[in-house]
Amino acid sequence: MKWLLVAIIVSGNTTSDLLNALGMRRHGEVREFHPSAIGRLITALAKNRYVAGGIIAMAISFFALLSLLSIADLSFAIPATSASYMIETVLAKVILKEDVRWQRWLGACLVAAGVGLLAIE
Amino acid sequence: MKTPRLLAIAAVLFNVAGNYCLSVGMKESGKLVSVAPLDYLRVLLNPWIAFGVALLFGWLIAQLSLLSWADLTWVLPITALGYALPAVLGALFLHERVQATRWAGVALIVSGVAVVSRTIPRTHRARGGSTH
């Protein structure tokens, strides 16, 4: 059950990150952070189909995380759910057409290895 | 250049604090592996979980704002600090046993963050800035 929940969380996170990145690229830079501007931002994002889809995927992932936290330690749950790391880097290059140079690959590899070590029980 | 870094710090802090509150709340609430939505709504009545959800809402706003300024391949490694800090918080406040391998993991993550933080946050052309 623990690893099924991890799989649900990983799929949800990957989908959510890609959709949110696409949606926020279309939205443009967020420059103001006072309460009324954040209110307007939330209204605008609610109409953004990519972000809405990203948040639905995130919600599925969130409820699976709640379940996982009830049966596993925090220091297992969070690292284990980040297995999507390298997949997301590849998808960001292919789908989002990001310029992923060696520093970012190295950084992603170091972080993925670190996250893997964190997940060892 | 300053805004993405400030947003990244905010996203990491909101994320770590939110997940910490959820973990404390879920330890109080007991096991929850269910497909019934009401079971999940019930645990939201726990103050730790309610506060954790509020903090994660702050994380969502910071993360989405950060994605409007930076590439996903910049955001992912930088905000991975949020994976390293729970190991430290888990050891300090939840009395979870953290092994040497996990500390090595924390060191690797910090190295990865250091490498990526030296790259330009956004490689694609910015769309016109929003007034939000």
Image (cartoon, helix red, strand yellow):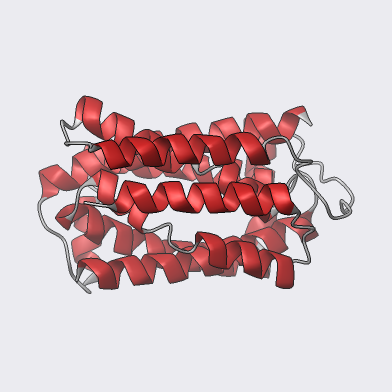
> Where residue B61 appears, x then y in whole percent?
58, 44
Residue A33 visible in the current orientation? no
> Where residue A59 appears, x then y in whole percent?
42, 62
Instruction: Judge whether B20 appears above or below A16 on screen.
Output: above
Q: Write the residue at 81% across / 41% down.
A: B131
Q: Going by the image, does A100 lie left or right of B22? A: right
Residue A115 visible in the current orientation? yes
In the rendered view of the protein, which quadrant contains the N terminus of chain A?
bottom left
Q: Going by the image, does B106 lie left or right of B47? A: right
Q: Answer with the quarter of the image where residue A17 lies.
A: bottom right
Instruction: Judge whether B58 appears above or below B39 on screen.
Output: above
Q: Going by the image, does A18 lie left or right of B119? A: left
Q: Write the residue at 35% across / 71% down.
A: A7
> Where residue B100 appears, x then y in whole percent?
27, 36
Q: Answer with the quarter of the image where residue A23 lies.
A: bottom right
* Of A111 and A98, the residue lying toward us: A111
> Where residue A67 appears, x then y in whole percent?
23, 60
Q: Write the residue at 73% across / 31% down.
A: B3
Q: Write the residue at 79% across / 60% down.
A: A26
